[in-house]
Image (cartoon, helix red, strand yellow):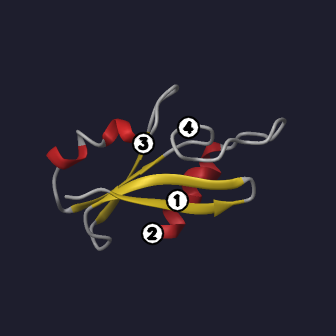
């Protein structure tokens, strides 16, 4: 599986991430931990089942995603939803 970068426009810039597999596969969204980014999954995903469509996103201010503006409330469920709706 080859990784492919993506960007999703949002109100403060964009959410970036990486995807693996065919979009027809069952989607799995991977979210990194604190002080990390989507790149953490690059060695793991190729070892996992190929029948899934793997989507790893960079949270705001991490990896290649735009940072939140100062004072902007963080609602991670909305971010994950934005990524899911792009692919489904």
Decide which of tag 3 and tag 4 comes sooner along the chain: 3
Quadrant assignment, res 75? top right
Residue corresponding to mark 4: 62
Residue corresponding to mark 2: 87
Q: Residue at x 57, y 57 (%)?
A: 81
Residue 85 x/y as whole percent: 53, 67
Q: Is residue 88 left or right of residue 68?
A: left
Q: Tell me the SS state at disc 2.
A: helix
Tell me the quarter of the image containing the C terminus.
Answer: bottom left
Q: Which mark is residue 38?
A: 3
Q: Tell me the SS state at disc 4.
A: loop
CA distance for labels 3 and 2 = 17 Å
CA distance for labels 1 and 4 = 15 Å
Decide which of tag 4 and tag 2 comes sooner along the chain: 4
Q: Are marks 3 and 1 in contact (CB under 8 Å)?
A: no
Q: Residue at x 58, y 53 (%)?
A: 15
Q: Which mark is residue 46?
A: none
Residue 28 x/y as whole percent: 35, 54
Neighbor class of circle 1 (other Cα within 10 Å; few <14, some 14-19, many 20+) is many
Q: Nearer the viewer, mark 4 or mark 2?
A: 4
Q: Nearer the viewer, residue 65 or 23?
A: 65
Decide which of tag 3 and tag 1 comes sooner along the chain: 3
């Amino acid at each position: 599986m080859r990784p492919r970068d993506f960007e999703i426009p949002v109100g403060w810039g964009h959410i970036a991430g990486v995807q693996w597999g065919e979009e027809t596969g069952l989607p799995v969204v991977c979210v990194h931990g604190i002080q990390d980014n989507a790149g953490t999954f690059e060695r793991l995903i190729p070892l996992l089942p190929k029948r899934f469509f793997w989507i790893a996103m960079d949270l705001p201010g991490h990896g290649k995603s735009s940072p939140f503006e100062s004072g902007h409330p963080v609602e991670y469920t909305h971010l994950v939803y934005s990524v899911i709706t792009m692919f489904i």
